[in-house]
């Protein structure tokens, strides 16, 4: 095993339960989720399509927009961090199996 693999195994054994918690995944991933929703908001408010901008300005409910942005950002944050956790867990199990052989 390389030094990097050993360091990863030590890190993951110490932090795997802490990284698995959904609340932590949400808090750490939320900035990335907000960056993900930024293009949606820019597209909505840029006014590049005049007709769509007119409809949005007359029928857009700001509360619904805020809730939608928060839901999208939260989903993206949790999903991306859970995926990262699964990848790290897979790597840990592979390294552990390799170490036992």
Image (cartoon, rainbow, N blue to C red):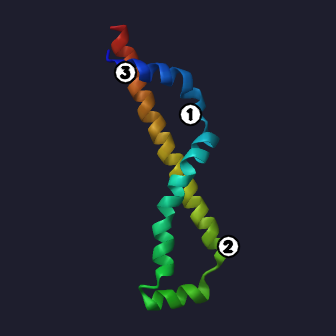
In the image, residue 61 above or below residue 91: below
Nearer the viewer's eye, disc 2 or disc 1? 1
> Residue at 47% of width from left, 81% of height from top?
46
Q: Earlier in the sequence, mark 2 or mark 1?
A: 1
In the image, residue 36 above or below residue 9: below
Q: Quadrant of the N terminus?
A: top left
Residue on which disc 1 sits:
19
Disc 2 to disc 3: CB gap under 8 Å: no
Q: Helix, strand or loop at disc 1?
A: helix
Q: Quadrant of the C terminus?
A: top left
Q: Residues within 10 Å of mark 1 (few under 14, many from 20)?
A: some
Q: Helix, strand or loop at disc 2?
A: helix
> Residue at 50% of width from left, 43% of height from top?
81
In the picture provided, is 99 more to the left or to the right than 81?
left
CA distance for labels 2 and 1: 32 Å
Tell me the number on the disc at residue 63. Answer: 2
Q: In the rendered picture of this protein, how many numbered marks are placed on residues?
A: 3
Residue on which disc 3 sits:
5
Q: Earlier in the sequence, mark 2 or mark 3?
A: 3
Disc 1 to disc 3: CB gap under 8 Å: no
The location of residue 70, given as percent across then percent down, is 60, 61
In the picture provided, is 86 more to the left or to the right than 31?
left
The location of residue 59, given as percent across then percent down, is 60, 86
Nearer the viewer's eye, disc 2 or disc 3? 3
């Amino acid at each position: 095993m390389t030094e990097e693999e050993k360091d990863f195994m030590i890190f993951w054994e110490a932090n795997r339960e802490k990284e698995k918690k959904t609340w932590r995944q949400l808090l750490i991933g939320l900035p990335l989720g907000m960056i993900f929703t930024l293009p949606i908001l820019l597209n909505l408010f840029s006014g590049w399509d005049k007709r769509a901008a007119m409809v949005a300005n007359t029928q857009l409910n700001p509360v619904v927009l805020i809730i939608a942005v928060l839901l999208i950002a939260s989903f993206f944050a949790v999903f991306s961090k859970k995926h990262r956790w699964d990848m790290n867990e897979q790597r840990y199990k592979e390294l552990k199996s390799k170490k036992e052989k």
